[in-house]
Structures are given as C-alpha cells and as structure tokens.
Image (cartoon, rainbow, N blue to C red):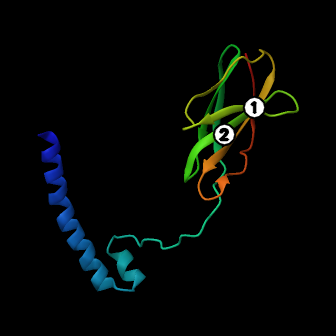
Amino acid sequence: MAVTFRDQKRAELLAPMRANAAYVQSVASEDLHMLLSSGFQAVSTNRAQSPLAAPLIKKVNNDYPGMLVATIKMGRNTKSLEVQYKNGADWQLLGTFPNGRSIVIGSLTSGQNYSVRARGVGGSTGYSVWSEPMTRMVI
C-alpha cells in the first residue's frame, strides 16, 4: 500500500515538472542564456571518452597494531579501486575494492613505514593513473 501511495505521489509530481521543462525548452529553443536563466541546466551531448581521474587518498590511519586503514576518494565514473602497498622497492597488490571506505591493510611489521597508493577501475579507459602514495608508520 505504501509503494502504491509513493508511486502515485511521484506521478503527481513528475507530470507538472515535465510540462514545465517542455515549456522552457520550447521558449528557450537554442538560446542557452535563456535556458540557464530559467533555472534549468543544459544537458551535455558530449559522449567523448575521457580518462578516469586518479583517486585521492584522504587519510591512512595507524590506530591498530600491525595494520593501516586507508580512506580513498574515488573519481567520477570509477567502479572500483585497485590498491597497492609497499615497504621497500616493490609494490604489492592488496586487492580491488568497490569503495574507498576503511580499506584495511593487515599483517604489517610495527615500526616500519608503508606506502599506499590506488588507481581507479572502470570508465572508458579501464584504469586511471596511480594516486600519489601516502606513507605512514605502523604502530
């Protein structure tokens, strides 16, 4: 019953909104300034492929012994994140994650510095460039 009520209210709201948008589109026609002055935004018709933006490592916390917890901001059109870490010369793949909240890197050696980096997966180009690494000491 609640779903039916919700759908009915949605239909009641969408009908006048569509009528308003159709009116603005017919009056503004090809005049972008007039369209923007109505409060509506122009829809982009650009379908060009563009590379994914590199993710941003917001923080890497060392709150727990032997582990780090990373928080990473995903770029637009990013479907998942590939995360690597290192304590030395070679990067090691931690895995692929559907979001950047609380990515745990465990089984680390206390007192050692570890670097973390990530890249976006998805979009038209497959992968973004790697983020700038962030380094923290494990407690």
Q: Residue at x 59, y 55 (%)?
A: 123
Q: Nearest the camera: 77 or 24?
A: 77
Left or right: residue 80 versus residue 30 is right
Asked which quadrant contains residue 72, the reply is top right
Q: Which amino acid does label 1 sit on?
A: Tyr
- Which mark, residue 85? 1
* x and y, in percent, of residue 94 in the image: 69, 30
* x and y, in percent, of residue 106 in the image: 68, 20
Above or below residue 8? Residue 42 is below
Q: Which of marks 2 and 1 is in front?
A: 2
* x and y, in percent, of residue 69 in the image: 63, 26
Q: Residue at x 72, y 51 (%)?
A: 129
- Which mark, residue 82? 2
Left or right: residue 111 versus residue 64 is right
Q: Residue at x 65, y 53 (%)?
A: 126
* x and y, in percent, of residue 46 in the image: 53, 72
Asked which quadrant contains residue 57, the reply is top right
Disc 2 secondary structure class = strand
Label 2 – label 1 distance at C-alpha: 11 Å
Above or below residue 11? Residue 57 is above
Left or right: residue 44 versus residue 134 is left
Above or below residue 19? Residue 99 is above
Q: Which residue is drawn at 20% across and 72% down?
A: 19
Mark 2 nearby-residue class (10 Å; few <14, some 14–19, many ≥20): many
Disc 1 secondary structure class = strand
Mark 1 nearby-residue class (10 Å; few <14, some 14–19, many ≥20): some
- Which mark, residue 49? none
Cβ–Cβ below 8 Å for labels 2 and 1? no
Q: What residue type is labelled 2?
A: Glu
